Image (cartoon, helix red, strand yellow):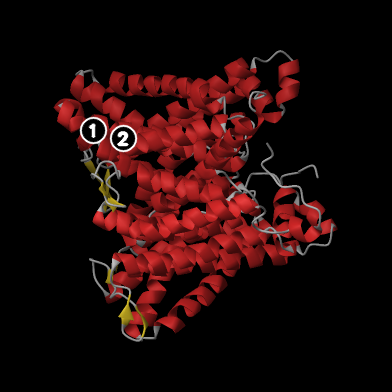
Amino acid sequence: MTQFIQILVIGLTLGSIYAVVSVGFVLIYKATEVFNFAQGNLMVVGAYISYSFIRGFQISPIFAMAGAVLAAGLLGVLLHFLIFRPMLGKPVLSIVMGTIGLAMIINAVLVMAYGPIGKSYPDVFPSEVMDWFGVRISSVDFIVIGIATGCVAIFAVFFRRSPLGLQMRATAENFEAASLSGVNANLVFATALGIGTGLAAVGGILLATTNALSIGLAEIFFLAFPAIVIGGLESLGGAALGGVIVGVVQSMAAGYVSQDAQTVIVYVLLLVVLLIRPYGLFGQREIVRV
Amino acid sequence: MPTKTINSSYRADNRLIQSRARWTWLAILGLGLLYLPHLLLNREFLGLTLSNSQLLGLSLSQINVALLFIIAAVALNVLTGYTGLISLGNAGFFALGAALVAVFDLQHDLPFVLVLPSVAIIGALVGVIVGIPALRVRGLYLLLATLAFHQIAGYLFLEYQQANYGEIGVIYAPPEVIGRWALNSETRWYFFLLVLTTMTLVGANNLLRTRQGRALVAIRDHDIAAASAGIDVNGVKLRVFGMSSAVITVAGALYAWYLGVAEASMFSIHFALDFIAMIIIGGLGSINGAVLGVLLIQLLPQVITTVSAQVTSTSPMVGELLGRNGPQLNDIILGLIIILIVIFKPAGLNGIWLSLKRSFVRWPYTS
């Protein structure tokens, strides 16, 4: 039983990180219809920037992490104007390939700047091992879950309550109607990109605190795809829930089956969901004009 | 000056090679290809010795790998470019081919003439199974479904490799094609692969002349309209998945034989994405484009290495920087090329070539 709870906690930690990154991804997709393959690399960029802030500039961890998220958001806006905006309206495969090209560039620049060997992330969270009825849980996990949930919650409040969130929802629902109502589409897209990248950076930083910091962290994003599909490609809440589900499933697979099998089992789950209910738990059936 | 002939019969219009001029160019290309091994191995061209950097530091082994990738890229282009079914399964099928060769050749020692067809048949069957999600989902979701196949195939190959061969990977001996004649030299591989590549290119080009080929393009453009025109959309989708997967699996089998070793990390997602990059850079839906795309991606690292070697002699610092970060520079340039092509020239390298031809013909009335 204790092993089960331990695996569950690891799964929830991982799942909350997936949730943050997936919400960012779905936000970008909902706003600009761009399938951002580079989200994983943007995660790693955020983590590396915060690493530089902490180790290089000796800024205190909290400001360093917030600053890194802000920097990543600005980078996202820059990328929007340079790359995402010209790609609007192109066929799906071209957009995917464009973001893959972006991912390659980001990866290469990071390796050139920081070297290929992983670095150990400074301990920014108090890491005590707490003992609950025989279950050993690290406090880092709790803090990660807390921060991730907090970010998703803050974002949800922003999306539902603030005027800019209303504009984003309107643009995502019907682009032309929103433009006619006076919404500045470009501003909305740029904000969506910035927030999406910022959330990715949050996920990356949280991931770096639990694992070592290296380029390979970007691969984690491939496990977020099932999360997004399970939740529904157009549903933000679904993305968060899907992230948690995938995290728990992956952790269970790693614990009870084998380390090598974790990715495969998550992808088998993805395949099953695609065959049974392609639009995910919370998505809607796509209605296409013939 | 016209670039196309004016045809006066259906038969002439349907011909694969339409004009005398094209036959001449193809003949010259053929002669060049036959001379290529001599050029690369002996480094001389009709008596003139060429330096390493003039040949871009190419060796016959890179040409061989490029030929293999051309076969796979053309098959993928038929699947994704002609029929519009996005598939990331390449690496998975390569892994399947490698595993099948290990089972047939190493464990059971089947003769070569039996191995390749069996690999093709099993590749086709697996391809049909992988194609089943294509009946249910489209576009992006199909990409994810094939990504799932990629992960599953990679995992199964890893298990197979670790169960039977250990960490180094599966090791293959050069195949004996007929009797004792084995494919154990670069030149032999080159001519063997040249034959196969020519067959694949002719087959793919020929596909558009047939009813099935037109059905593929119809499905890509608008599958509901295609269904209402009487095309069995589901059947055609499965068949094209099967056919292209068979070719890709055979390419994977030959790749394993050629390299002599196959290890699970070779068939990574980067490998699969490289193929999609090749066909998109070349131009989706054009066979010549696939060839150009493969050549660009295969030769780019060579060009960078040669350029950095040149630069080192004149300016050591820049040269050292290039040398140390060669693979990263390769990725950056490749990523930039992909983004530029997606944004500015979606028709790819083939599109650039066609517009060059057109402006040459219409000079000075170029737009």
Nearer-the-camera pick, B302 or A268 = B302
Question: Label 2 marks which chain's residue?
Answer: B
| Mark 1 element type | helix
Tell me if label 1 and label 2 are in contact, CB under 8 Å.
yes
Q: CA distance from mark 1 to mark 2?
A: 7 Å
Q: What label sits on residue A195 in the rendered view? A: none
Residue designated by label 2:
B329
Q: Position of residue A94 (x, y in %)?
A: 56, 39
> Callout 1: 10 Å neighbours few (<14), some, many (20+)?
many
Q: Quadrant of residue A46?
A: top left
Nearer-the-camera pick, A152 or B317 = B317
A60 horizontally vs A284: left or right:
left
| Mark 2: amino acid | Leu
A23 horizontally vs B303: left or right:
right
Q: Position of residue B255 (x, y in %)?
A: 37, 65
Nearer-the-camera pick, A13 or B367 = B367
| Mark 2 element type | helix
In this orientation, does residue B117 appear? yes
Count of all numbered marks drawn on residues in the image: 2
Question: Label 1 marks which chain's residue?
Answer: B
Q: Position of residue B62 (x, y in %)?
A: 33, 54
Q: Which callout, 1 or 2, points at the residue further toward the start of the chain?
A: 1
A112 horizontally vs B148: left or right:
left
Residue, x 23% and y 18% (percent of image)? A59
Q: What label sits on residue B322 in the rendered view? A: 1
